[in-house]
């Protein structure tokens, strides 16, 4: 909350209520700042840190050729403890070290929505059933229907006879020009120095769908991201003409009650490029 919003609340609330709110607001900010910082303590035989990086792992890893000692790692949410089981660094010679093989590691961990088991140079991951899987990428056609590009799982979900083993429909190929919905509008961007950039913006309407692994066969709890895909005829934005380059294409989330053009105009008013 900004200072301006806080002042508005001070005018709208009774004094006693605002004082309580203001104390809570300051306490909440202190807690937030506390968790955003990293607190660490280094010792010869261990390293301890408290950070906003959350994870869980109990593992032992041998030393590599560089600066990592053999260590036990115990991480529970924000608390991370590394206990060095040896003070030696060079388990491997740098010349003979195999980057693809890595160091031997033993233990368990949870990250990237998987439960991991480490057994030396081997590791096994078990995906949690609540994780999301990508199902489809769909683009609106001129006739108002949707053209679907289904993932391998999506073809099973939608009982499609499509036999491809990967996402095969390149919607940017020219063969789709006369099939997919596409409109071009005038677009104006006002830079910070007042310069007005006038461009042509060509838009398409796209959807992407994800479903939970254990709910693949139903739309319940699915996630759908519906956007307009925007392509400009020239670079646009603050970095236009520089070595970094301006924006040529982007996307913007469309609201349920908007037309594609209304979404583009909202993007034109609000987005800084």
Image (tube, rainbow, N blue to C red):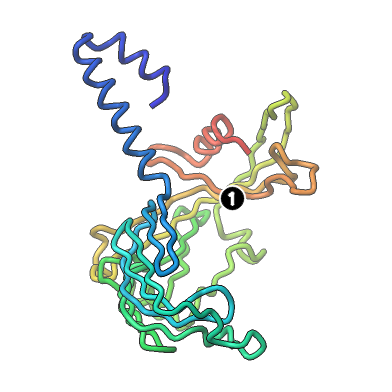
Looking at the rendered image, the quarter that the N terminus falls into is: top left
Q: Where is residue 255 shown, x and y percent of the image?
A: 41, 40
Q: Is residue 169 left or right of residue 18?
A: right
Residue ID for mark 1: 182
Looking at this view, is 160 or 1 the one in front? 1
The residue under the point 75% across, 41% down is 240
The residue under the point 35% across, 58% down is 54
Rendered position, 244 above or below 177: above
Q: Residues within 10 Å of mark 1 (few under 14, many from 20)?
A: some
The residue under the point 42% across, 54% down is 40
The residue under the point 36% across, 41% down is 34
Question: Residue farthest to the bottom?
Answer: 96
Q: Where is residue 241 shown, x and y percent of the image?
A: 80, 42
Q: Where is residue 112 shown, x and y percent of the image?
A: 38, 67
The image quadrant that residue 15 belongs to is top left
- Say if residue 157 shows up in the picture: no
Looking at this view, is 187 or 223 the one in front? 223
Element at badge 1?
Answer: loop
The image quadrant that residue 218 belongs to is bottom left
Q: Is residue 211 left or right of residue 206?
A: left
- Say if residue 85 shows up in the picture: yes
Looking at the rendered image, the quarter that the C terminus falls into is: top right
């Amino acid at each position: 909350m900004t200072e301006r919003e806080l002042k508005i609340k001070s005018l709208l609330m009774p004094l006693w209520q605002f004082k309580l709110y203001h104390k809570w607001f300051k306490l909440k900010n202190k807690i937030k700042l506390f968790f955003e910082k990293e607190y660490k303590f280094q010792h010869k035989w261990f390293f301890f840190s408290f950070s906003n990086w959350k994870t869980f792992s109990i593992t032992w890893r041998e030393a590599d050729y560089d600066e990592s000692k053999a260590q036990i790692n115990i991480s529970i949410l924000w608390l991370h403890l590394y206990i060095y089981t040896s003070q030696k660094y060079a388990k491997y010679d740098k010349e003979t070290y195999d980057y693809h093989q890595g160091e031997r590691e033993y233990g368990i961990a949870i990250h990237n929505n998987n439960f991991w088991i480490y057994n030396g140079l081997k590791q096994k991951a078990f995906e949690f059933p609540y994780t999301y899987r990508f199902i489809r990428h769909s683009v609106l056609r001129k006739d108002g229907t949707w053209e679907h590009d289904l993932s391998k799982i999506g073809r099973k979900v939608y009982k499609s006879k499509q036999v491809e083993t990967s996402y095969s429909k390149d919607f940017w190929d020219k063969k789709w020009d006369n099939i997919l919905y596409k409109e071009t509008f005038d677009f104006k961007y006002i830079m910070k120095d007042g310069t007005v950039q006038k461009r042509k913006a060509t838009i398409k309407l796209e959807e992407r769908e994800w479903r939970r692994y254990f709910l693949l066969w139903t739309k319940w709890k699915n996630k759908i991201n519906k956007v307009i895909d925007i392509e400009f005829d020239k670079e646009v934005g603050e970095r236009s003409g520089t070595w970094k380059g301006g924006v040529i294409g982007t996307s913007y989330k469309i609201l349920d009650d908007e037309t594609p053009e209304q979404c583009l105009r909202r993007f034109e008013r609000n987005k800084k490029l």
